[in-house]
Image (tube, rainbow, N blue to C red):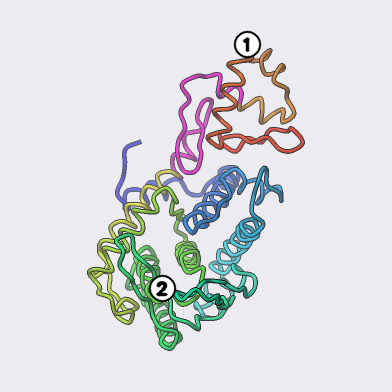
């Protein structure tokens, strides 16, 4: 399908509304996995796409997985549901308390970070769930520069300004919901109000804003992480290093990030359009991409696995009509790509979607 700019993509999406209940359920299920997997994967979560789906819909993962990553992913999904539910309370203004509640839910509890000082001595500090930072935070950019966010002392005031600004702009209607989401994301990241979880909260808030205004939701794909961070970095160069300037940046100042965000959002909307309209034999979807198999046997195998999770290799061989070696090769290829998984009890789970 030909690429569209954001306005064209939104117009095409709106022409498809209202969605059937079947299509809505399909899209909601995909978004749940796509958002949670990608938003957490950007921050270093090691669960695979398939493990994420099994965890969120079946309550357990397959293979080796860190307990921390599992708990983090489940908490992320609770936060997503919480933010989308809150977005439907149209008459309620945004509050700092809601943002802190999201953060408390995401991190679950305070925890200690242990590290070694330059002189070799051991030390630690506490990450606070639901509380603004108590120590300075910064990041080393991909270019080796140290970029400093708002200080703990100025964070409460800047967050108060951010929330007040959002509520005022929303009431005035002077910015589109997309531009509100873009600018909120950028200003929030420049404050970096918490000691951990800021990127994940920023992406949750983007979807809170979009959902509140009836817009399709957005997934920032982890495979595009470098482009995403580069767009933020380019905007930082235009805005300047002062955190207070970043926390009050204008859309004109953050043009590189705005342009990137709009292009990314248009692409995601077109994925939604294709996901809904291009259904049928041989068409599959995985983590925001359309998958076209060279052999129709691949689709046959996937459908058999979906319909018969306990099917044997021998049964597959007989139904497909190809030799065992070819069956095993195709299954291995699809497992390596994450399209399917085999659970501990020997059942197949098809992760790729038709």
Based on the picture, tell me whether residue 323 belongs to the magenta stretch: no
For image coordinates 40% across by 83% down, the residue present is: 151
Which residue is denoted by mark 2 in the rendering? 188
Q: Nearer the viewer, residue 146 or 124?
A: 124
Query: Circle 2: is it few (<14), some (14-19), or many (20+) Cα within 10 Å?
Result: many
Residue 79 in the image, given as x and y percentages of width and height: 59, 65
Residue 149 in the image, given as x and y percentages of width and height: 38, 76
Asked if one can make out residue 159 in the rendered structure from this viewpoint, the answer is: yes
Which residue is denoted by mark 1 in the rendering? 321
| Label at residue 134 | none
Q: Nearer the viewer, residue 219 or 110?
A: 110
Magenta span:
272-301
Q: Is residue 253 left or right of residue 119?
A: left
Residue 44 in the image, given as x and y percentages of width and height: 51, 56
* SS of the residue under disc 1: loop
* SS of the residue under disc 2: helix
Q: Earlier in the sequence, mark 1 or mark 2?
A: 2
298 lies above or below 275? above
For image coordinates 50% across by 30% down, the residue present is: 283
Q: CA distance from mark 1 to mark 2?
A: 57 Å
């Amino acid at each position: 399908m030909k690429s569209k700019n954001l306005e064209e993509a939104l117009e095409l999406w709106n022409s498809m509304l209202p969605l059937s209940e079947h299509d809505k359920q399909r899209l909601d299920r995909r978004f749940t996995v796509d958002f949670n997997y990608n938003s957490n994967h950007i921050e270093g979560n090691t669960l695979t796409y398939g493990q994420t789906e099994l965890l969120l819909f079946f309550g357990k993962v397959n293979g080796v997985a860190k307990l921390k990553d599992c708990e983090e992913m489940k908490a992320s999904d609770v936060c997503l549901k919480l933010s989308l539910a809150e977005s439907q309370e149209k008459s309620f203004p945004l509050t700092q308390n809601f943002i802190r509640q999201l953060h408390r839910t995401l991190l679950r509890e305070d925890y200690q970070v242990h590290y070694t000082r330059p002189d070799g001595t051991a030390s630690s500090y506490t990450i606070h769930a639901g509380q603004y930072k108590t120590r300075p935070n910064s990041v080393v950019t991909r270019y080796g520069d140290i970029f400093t966010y708002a200080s703990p002392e100025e964070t409460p005031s800047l967050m108060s300004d951010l929330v007040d600004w959002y509520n005022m702009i929303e009431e005035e209607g002077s910015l589109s919901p997309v531009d509100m989401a873009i600018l909120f994301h950028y200003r929030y990241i420049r404050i970096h109000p918490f000691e951990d979880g800021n990127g994940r909260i920023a992406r949750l808030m983007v979807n809170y804003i979009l959902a509140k205004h009836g817009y399709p939701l957005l997934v920032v794909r982890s495979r595009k992480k470098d482009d995403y961070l580069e767009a933020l970095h380019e905007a930082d160069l235009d805005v300047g290093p002062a955190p207070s300037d970043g926390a009050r940046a204008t859309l004109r100042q953050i043009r590189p990030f705005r342009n990137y965000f709009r292009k990314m959002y248009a692409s995601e909307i077109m994925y939604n359009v294709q996901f809904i309209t291009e259904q049928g034999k041989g068409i599959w979807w995985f983590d925001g991409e359309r998958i076209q198999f060279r052999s129709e046997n691949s689709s046959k195998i996937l459908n058999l696995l979906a319909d018969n999770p306990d099917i044997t290799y021998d049964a597959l061989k007989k139904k497909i009509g190809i030799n065992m070696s070819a069956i095993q090769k195709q299954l291995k290829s699809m497992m390596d790509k994450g399209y399917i998984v085999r659970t501990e009890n020997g059942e197949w789970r098809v992760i790729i979607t038709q």
